Image: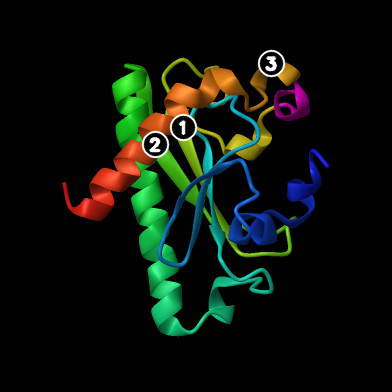
Amino acid sequence: MAGDWRMDRIGAALRGENPTVLRRLTAGFAVIGDVQFLPGYSVLLVDEPDVQRLSDLPRPKRLSFLSDMDQLGEAVERACRRLDPAFRRVNLEILGNTDPFLHAHVWPRFEWEPADMVGRPVWLYPRERWSDGQFALGPRHDALRDAIGSELDRLRSGT
């Protein structure tokens, strides 16, 4: 049934059923965000559904997760810089306040953002940005998905 993967994002990724997965990384899955009001927004999902915090992972896997977060952040940065000359930077966050599984947010930031939002956390954007259908992930984001995935491949191959 359409939408069921959202109820178990990590399990769906492990089963190959999460359509937002960009790449399988060492300690998790790079996925593109469901909402794209900041084009390129991505998330790193840990590959163990029961892990809630970074500190729940043994140190070697914890370091792998952080390395994966770094790679996803750089891939988003490279792709967004190439696709939008107004790209400014990437913000990386591990929050854990809402979803009960370890994940890291990768937020691209742009010069075209409203002046009152440029220096503020993404979470302070108006609620309607998060639910407005015009920002929902869809086929128009395929080139962006491909660009981030290609950058992840380059980074993993050392180029």
**Secondary-structure class at tag 3:** helix
Give yes or no for residue 130 being in the magenta stretch.
yes
Circle 2 sits on which residue? 148
- The image quadrant of residue 36 is top right
The three-letter amino acid code for the residue at tag 3 is: Gln
Residue 65 in the image: x percent, y percent? 44, 66
Measure how far apart labels 2 and 1 are at the Cα level. 5 Å
**Which residue lies at the image location 74% right of the left edge and 57% below the top edge?**
8
Measure how far apart labels 3 and 1 are at the Cα level. 17 Å
Circle 3 sits on which residue? 134
**Which residue lies at the image location 66% right of the left edge and 34% below the top edge?**
124
**Apparent side of residue 49 relative to residue 47 in the rendered image (left or right):** right
Give yes or no for residue 129 being in the magenta stretch.
yes
**Which residue lies at the image location 70% right of the left edge and 24% below the top edge?**
129
Q: Residues within 10 Å of mark 2 (few under 14, many from 20)?
A: many
Q: Residues within 10 Å of mark 1 (few under 14, many from 20)?
A: many
Magenta segment, prevailing SS (helix, strand or loop): helix
Asked if marks 2 and 1 touch (Cβ < 8 Å), the reply is yes
Circle 1 sits on which residue? 145
Would you say residue 99 is visible in this rendering?
yes
Image position of 84 with respect to 75: above or below? above
Q: Give the extent of the magenta segment.
A: 126-132
Q: Residues within 10 Å of mark 3 (few under 14, many from 20)?
A: few
